[in-house]
Image (tube, rainbow, N blue to C red):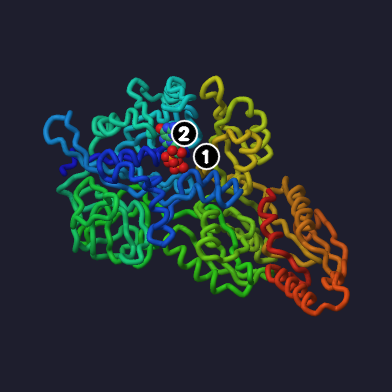
Amino acid sequence: YPTDKIRNFSIIAHVDHGKSTLADRLLELTGTIKRGHGQPQYLDKLQKEGQNNRTIFRWRKTSLFCALRASTMVERERGITVKAQTATMFYNYELKKGDPSYLLNLVDTPGHVDFSYEVSRSLAACQGALLVVDAAQGVQAQTVANFYLAFESNLAIIPVINKIDQPTADPDRVKAQLKSMFDLDTSDVLLTSAKTGQGLEHVLPAVIERIPPPPGKCDSNLRMFLLDSYYDEYKGVICHVAVVDGSLRKGDKITSAATSQSYEVLDVGIMHPELRPTGFLLTGQVGYMVSGMRSTKEARVGDTLFHSRTTVEPLPGFKPAKHMVFSGLYPADGSDFEGLNHAIERLTCNDASVSVARESSTALGLGFRCGFLGLLHMDVFHQRLEQEYGTHIISTVPTVPYIFEYSDGSKVEVQNPAAFTANPKIRVVASWEPTVLATIIIPSEYVGAVINLCSERRGEQIEYSFIDTQRAFMKYRLPLREIVVDFYNELKSITSGYASFDYEDSEYVASDVVKLDILLNGQPVDAMATIVHKLKAQRVGRELVEKLKKYIDRQMFEITIQAAIDSKVIARETISAMRKNVLAKCYGGDVTRKKKLLEKQKEGKKRMKRVGSVDIPQEAFHAILKVS
Ligand code: GTP
């Protein structure tokens, strides 16, 4: 296929607006997958393979909302999908003059802003995007975020109003929104129903007519983008690549611009939608490559790969992964450090974007400090550890990377409250915290409640306008720390579930933060320390001690629970002593019953962490995660 017969595009949409269904219909229409095969969705089919570790998991947008809602596992699971594998389709477009056959690459983008860098890299391999909007719901927060990512990548954008079969569909209203929000020409908006098939026949012709072919040069040296990678038990690391210039053949020697490592190409081909070896990939094509990389850590998203014997200018935009949320992970059963170690090693094999460093806590023993791209990424990682590897974990309060300037003039990034002032001789003289730019779209009647929530979370309003008569659009700068804990949950609850929310990383701002220590019987519990804004310290401290009082059982001595800043106590609760005699109910000395009760008591103790002399149940650690 010469490049003018190739089109590379992606589908971008807000959660549940029909991206996967539409993708499936296009794959069916082109015979890439069988029509009406009864499978829920191609994506969902892959999920099963993923569970056998054959496919890397990728989380689609739904999972942001479900994961952050942190409600039932079932709800969360619903949102988890493997990445929609990038697929190549062959399509005959008879209406165009000359050879009717086209090669269309549907490049998948990860669904969530945690992966916005990966999204921008995937979009960099495309020349156009279908912007899918639900005909009833209209423009939502992720529609806005995705539109701008595509717009910044200079993509041709084809608006598609989907779900026009719904009784509440109002395509004219959505058209007006697209015009007012994005200044899009709405005269040629596509109207589709991925469910009934209505209007779908216009989609691929629009892709061919309105999206330009890839601009690469066939006779230049090879330059290809690394879009994504996953680990396959049988083949090793499989990279998804987009050939920008030149061509790639099996047997070629290639080098990575990011790591300078060289490899031999062992296998190369297209995804149709399963891997299909072709022996080569030409300019403008998107496909896979196997090159003997040992781990996905060697395959950096956004990296440029080129022939080893040549020198080329790397493609722009490569950035190493930036971790925005950190949390300590400890085995709930203290003895099972090795089990957790093994599970984390296996998981990171397929998700190179998690950073892992060993750490130890006096309260929790040996564990790990892990860095994640964002909240969803963290939540999903925790969930997979528990579900796929059966490890019970205690995670510490997620923290964001602060920057501290100390009295000795040094400036450091601090990812762990324990490191706040590791050296008692120096003081923190200035601190900065990361912020995000949040987009919130809500029905107008909830505006007041959302403004209150955002100001309580130290947000600064950047923009406030109306999409149409019924819905408001707000942009806020919020400290990342404030949305890490339970923000989305609360936003949903105060708007009866109607808010849509999205955010992107923004700058660091000066912030007056302090370390809040929790002490049990005078002893600091390092795993419960947190960094908070000075203005909120009092309230957070109070809430923490109250929560802990609820979860820690009375023991045979009095327990004091204190929150303190710089050794100054700001909140305190006590749990009075009690002699807990589990055998009290056993009159008559029934030996087996006595034994059973003692066993039960022992069982209960397993999930306890002992700090000094105080036993803290696992739930107490979980409960304080939600205090913000
Ligand atoms: P995420 O992957 O979760 O971001 O969602 P998505 O955008 O991929 O949406 P998906 O294709 O999973 O569709 C969400 C729901 O809408 C599913 O229940 C689909 O069956 C349904 N749906 C998709 N397209 C249509 C349509 O044209 N009409 C109607 N009535 N329902 C549709």
Q: Residue at x 59, y 64 (%)?
A: 329
Q: Residue 347: horizontal and vertical position, in percent?
A: 46, 63
Q: Amino acid at mark 2?
A: Val
The image shows residue 392, relative to residue 34, as above or below, that is below
Q: What is the C-alpha distance between the residues marked 1 and 2?
A: 9 Å
Other residues around mark 2 within 10 Å, as few (<14) / some (14–19) / many (≥20)? many
| Quarter holding ligand 1 | top left
Residue 147 appears in the figure: no
Q: Residue at x 53, y 66 (%)?
A: 357
Residue 39 appears in the figure: yes
Other residues around mark 1 within 10 Å, as few (<14) / some (14–19) / many (≥20)? many
SS label for mark 1: strand
Which badge, 1 or 2, comes first in the chain's sequence? 2
Q: Which residue is denoted by mark 1 in the rendering?
A: 502
The image shows residue 404, relative to residue 588, as above or below, that is above
Quadrant of the frame with the N terminus: top left
Q: Which is more toward the observer, 152 or 28?
A: 28
Q: Which is more toward the observer, 21 or 70?
A: 21
283 with respect to 153 (left or right): left
SS label for mark 2: helix
Toward which corner of the image does residue 94 lie, by quadrant? top left
Q: Residue 136: horizontal and vertical position, in percent?
A: 48, 27
Q: Residue 616: horizontal and vertical position, in percent?
A: 73, 65
Q: Does mark 1 have its CB less than 8 Å from ligand 1?
A: no
Q: Residue at x 49, y 24 (%)?
A: 168
Toward which corner of the image does residue 48 lie, by quadrant? bottom left
Mark 1 touches mark 2? (CB < 8 Å) = yes
Q: Amino acid at mark 1?
A: Asp
**In the image as oriented, which residue stretches furthest toward the left?**
98
The image shows residue 588, relative to residue 16, as above or below, that is below
Q: Which residue is denoted by mark 2 in the rendering?
A: 144
